[in-house]
Image: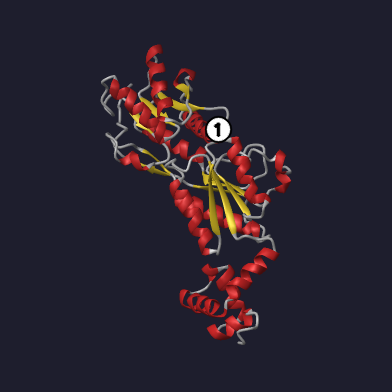
Amino acid sequence: MNKHNVATIEDVAQIAGVSIATVSRAIHTPAKVADTTRRKVLEAVAQTGYTANAMARSLRMRRSNMILILAPDVGDPNFSNILVGLETEASKRGYGVLIGNTQNDPAREADYLGFIASNKADGLILLTGHLPFGLAENGGAAKLPPVVAVNEPVRNADVPFVGVDNFAGARIATDYLIAQGHRRIAFIGHSTSKMVSMLREEGYRGSLASAGIAVDPALVLDGEGTTESGRAAVEHMFVRDHLPTAFFCVNDATALGVFIALSARGYELPRDFSVMGFDDISLASFVTPSLTTMKQPRLNIGEAAMELLLTLLEDKKPHSREMLLRSELIVRNSVRTITSV
């Protein structure tokens, strides 16, 4: 190749000893190419300078090969492995990721939309449970690229969703408590705004109904999914002197708050009360007693969500616009079997 000529894909193919189609796959869908072949292609790309030309072509096509991920709190233990799964799958397909830590701040979300408006991101992953604030200022939802919601569905919007089957998981958790002899089971985490909480409460109610156990409204308490809300819910129950034998908590953070409140009152777990969580965060196996909970396949959720988004970016029709993965019951030491109430 003449050094004054612009490098072409044919030049790369000739040097690498592969077909033009293989060069294209190695650049745009590297996961579909063998490692040894991909290395040959990348070496040829570096030798010819074809990468710069490919980037220029990408700019002409107004594509960035970047995905914007909006998360309310990247420090949330539920998000770390999901983010790893998202980034891993994106990297396999030749994409990079931009992570926006929104802190549920409308101004931050509006700022992050600038990446979309300036074509610095081709697709959007939402872990926030809502469409980004600031859409009105940026032309409305019609201006958004392909979007996939992860972990928390977006209410009242036609947004594809990938997450755990919260209803089924909550039924399994409550079924387990019932199988251990519990009939007075509290649910901590009632919410009218969080879809995840609502689905888990529905699963709890469905399990009780199937077992012929009436739901006691006094045993269903509000909760924001935080450790403090779990602690406060227990204190509220003691004020009313209306106690369960077991607590099913909307998530593990809430369960830790229940642990704190009961331990502060001198109770021994699970001898006096049983506690069930949901999510299986890293702390769940290290507290005393270790927490029985439902494990989310977070890495798989992230990978599946990114795969769905990239399918949409390729203008292909996905098999489904909703993917619900199963959670797994993790039995540890926070639930005891009782023979009478």
Is 37 rendered above or below residue 296?
A: below
Residue 125 or 321: which is nearer the viewer?
Answer: 125
Residue 292 seen in this snapshot: yes
Residue 297: x and y in percent read 44, 49
Is 239 rendered above or below residue 91?
A: above
The answer to whether 53 appears left or right of 38 in the picture is: right
Residue 267: x and y in percent read 27, 22
Residue 175 seen in this snapshot: no
**Label 1 sits on what residue type?**
Lys
Q: How many residues crowd mark 1 within 10 Å: few (<14), some (14–19), many (20+)? A: some
The quarter of the picture where the C terminus appears is top left
Residue 74: x and y in percent read 47, 43
The quarter of the picture where the N terminus appears is bottom right
Residue 84 or 200: which is nearer the viewer?
Answer: 84
The answer to whether 281 appears left or right of 160 in the picture is: left
The answer to whether 210 appears left or right of 110 in the picture is: left
Residue at the location (57% across, 30% down)? 193
Is 194 rendered above or below residue 316?
A: above
The residue labelled by disc 1 is 194
Residue at the location (60% across, 36% down)? 106
